[in-house]
Image: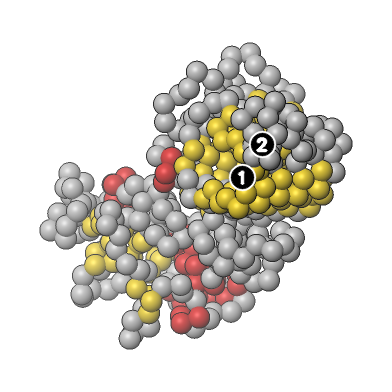
Amino acid sequence: TRERTHFVVLADNVFGTSGPWAVCIGPQDSLNDERLTDIIVEKNRFFADYGNLSSRLVSRPLVVWARDVSVRNNIFDGNGSDPSYAAVVIEQRGIEPAPSGIMVSNNTIYKTDVDNILGAWNFFAGVQVENTAGNIGVFNNLAVFPESTKGEAIVIIRNMDDSAVTESNNLLIQGTYSGLTIPDLPDHLKRDFSLLNDSPAIDQGISIQLFRDFTGALRPVNGVLDIGAFEYIATPKLKQAIIILKVLAGMDPGGVDLANDTDNDGILDMQDVLNILQSVSGTIQEPETLTPYAIDSDGWSYIPVCEDTKTVYVSSSEGDDSNDGLTEQSPVKTLERGQALLREGFPDRMLLKRGDVWTNESLRIKTGRNTQERMVFGYYGDSGSLVQCQFAKKYVFK
């Protein structure tokens, strides 16, 4: 009887720089009819440069020489790979039956570097199908590749032999904007490939039988699947918070003239922020419908402190930038110094002292680890007026 492996789930793994083929699902060689069927590959992370480099760079992180395989909700990070890179390759290896019944759906593929081998020709593909494969479905995959500047071949699907491939609603993004949260952190395991609120992948997928995303969150959120491994969970509260932070930073939150004092009281205050929010989003909703976090008896969202959260205290009246900023008794003075102590990609907090005023200082927004472990800006102190940040003789109250 022929050897057969079936009903296998490959999930929740981190695969590194074992090149050129990191993971292969199929027979041990081209001479044995060893059949693999009914395989699920999901929620794995493939990093081309993670761990000790092998003698050859990764060129094909996942190769499928099998039948009835579902490849879904995976992350393929190709930075550091071979110049010829195809995230998922489907082909017949030898005398085993040609691949059939393969579904590649809602994966995120990310590679923004080039020239890992000097003088080499660069080729990037999301999914490559070859060698008589049939009944292949490729849906809702997101690929982020660099701009083609030297004649490189950059495609999301490469069908080499006119195999029977059905594909729809796959998205290729090229250039400096990925629409992803923080995919380029030095620490591979802290890279966040979730969607930003303005990602072109949101609500652009085709309906398929896939009900969870990479994190295990239910999908779709609002009846339409997002493209890629992550479902964007948007809340009006989050969108409003982003606009408020932009106002605090002295930026234009999308077509709103901050020079206008909406209620003509001579200052840009919280009422103006509310008016701006209403002009942008149309409505101001009640807090209990806006937040994914627990709400206390007073209606405030409770965002829990993580084990590695660092809290930075800033006071213009009592602070000194030579302080460590880690306690209320040792605050730093300037917003710039406070922001420098915050770590990009961590759920840190910066608290400003009530009653203090900062003049002509910028507030650059950093991001936390993910949508549940956010970076928080707030205040400390039980008395005093609201925090005031003055920009061009206008005040923003937080």
x%, y% of residue 12?
48, 50
Q: Is the C-beta separation of discs 2 and 1 under 8 Å?
A: yes
Disc 2 or 1, which lies upstream in sequence?
A: 1
The image shows residue 356 at horizontal and vertical percentages of: 25, 64
Task: Name the quarter where the C terminus is drawn.
Answer: bottom left
Identify the residue at horizontal 33%, vertical 81% (top origin): 296
Could you tell whether 131 is left or right of 64 in the image? right
In-front residue for pair 309/231: 231
Colour scheme shown: secondary structure
Whether residue 285 is situated above or below residue 8 in the rendered picture: below
The residue that mark 2 highlights is 34
Report the Cα–Cα distance between label 2 and label 1: 8 Å
In this view, the residue in front, 165 or 253, is 165
Residue of label 1: 5
Where is 351 relative to 223, above or below? above
Q: Residue at x 77, y 45 (%)?
A: 100
